[in-house]
Each structure stands twice: as structure tokens, then as C-alpha cells.
Amino acid sequence: MTNTRKLTTMAILTALSVCFVALIHFPIFPAVAFLEYDPADIPILICSFAFGPAAGLVVTVIAAFIQGFTVSAQSGIYGIIMHIIATGAYVLASGLFYRKHKTKKLAAVSLLIGTAAMVVCMFFANLVITPYFMMGAVNKNTVSVVLSLMPFILLFNLLKAGINGTITFFLYKRVKHLFFKD
């Protein structure tokens, strides 16, 4: 594949990710409506599977900034950072494993590994970053608020990554021919 074709495909996948956030987003738990599901990770995971984890990370960063200044501008730099951490962990873990094990069964395993990586990274990211976003500082009160939300945050990340991984699993083999000439 030529570099031009690869970059063009990566740009299209970035655009799809941004469009998915703009068009499809809804809260999973009414009690914490700010935790919204979106399928934006699907094109990024496809990119990571097709072109490798580094390409997936590049698309993650570009999509995070575009989303952060357009469709998700209300979350500001916090949203950009959290998106890069969450999706970055997901695509790197999945992509690194998939790069060495390109069977259907191990593709599923790679997505499970990515899901676990995202959930674990977001647990720690929410403990450190969320108190600043919510209340401007880390103190006893902000940490207790975040800890009270943690069951929702963990379940949200598990569901979001699981749904996006499942869709990617069934979609990737059907679309990969669009990226590579036989």
C-alpha cells in the first residue's frame, strides 16, 4: 500500500470517528448522564488492526483533538486527555496483540485485552484527572466524589469498550479488503 493511500484511509477513519461522536451518543446510566456511549473507537480499532497500533494511536490523537474542539467542546482539554488515554490504551493493547496473532479467535482475545487495558487505565485516570475537571483540585472531598462514581465509571468503560470491540470484531474482516489490494 502506498503511503498516500494509507494516509488517506487513516484520514477517512478519523473523519468517521468524529462523525460517529457527532451523530451517535447517549448516556448508558441516567444517574451519570455525562458518561455517554459513542461508537467512535470502532474506526480507530479498525485502523489499528489494518495498519498497526502506531497508526491507531495517531488516529486517536487527531480524532481526540478534532472532537475536543468541535462536537465535544464542552469537555475541553479534559475530554481530549481522557479520550487519548482511554482509546489510546484500547488500540495500543489490542493492536499490539493482534499484530502478532491475526486469527479470528485471537482477534477476539486482542479486543478483550484492549478492553481490560482501557478499564484499568481509566480507573487510574479518573482518580487523578477527574477531580481537577469536576472541582479544580484534588482534595479529600473531590476524591470521595470520584470514588462514589467509580462503579459507574468502571462499568461504563467496560460496556463501551465491549460494545465497540464486538462491533469491530464482526466488522473488520468484512471491510479490510477496502484497505488492501489482493
Image (cartoon, rainbow, N blue to C red):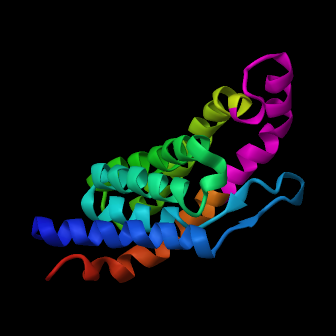
Q: Is residue 35 above or below residue 141?
A: below
Q: Is residue 10 above or below residue 80?
A: below
Report the residue that reaches farthest toward the left.
Answer: 2
At horizontal 25% and vertical 61% (from top left) the residue drawn is 51
Residue 106 in percent (x, y) is at 40, 59
Q: How many marks?
A: 0
Q: Which quadrant holds residue 148?
A: top right
**Quadrant (top left/top right/bottom left/bottom right) for the N terminus:** bottom left
Report the residue that reaches farthest toward the top.
Answer: 140
Residue 68 in percent (x, y) is at 54, 53
Q: Which residues are magenta?
A: 133-159
Asked if residue 166 shows in the view, the reply is yes
Q: Is residue 24 left or right of residue 135?
A: left
At horizontal 65% and vertical 26% (from top left) the residue drawn is 128
Report the residue that reaches farthest toward the right.
Answer: 31
Predominant secondary structure in magenta? helix
At horizontal 85% and vertical 31% (from top left) the residue drawn is 145
Q: Is residue 133 left or right of residue 77?
A: right
Q: Nearer the viewer, residue 53 or 166?
A: 53
Asked if residue 113 shows in the view, the reply is no
Does residue 35 show up magenta in the picture? no
Q: Is residue 64 above or below residue 167?
A: above
At horizontal 62% and vertical 65% (from top left) the residue drawn is 38
Q: Is residue 169 left or right of residue 35?
A: left
**Quadrant (top left/top right/bottom left/bottom right) for the C terminus:** bottom left
Residue 30 in percent (x, y) is at 87, 60
Q: Which quadrant holds residue 126?
A: top right
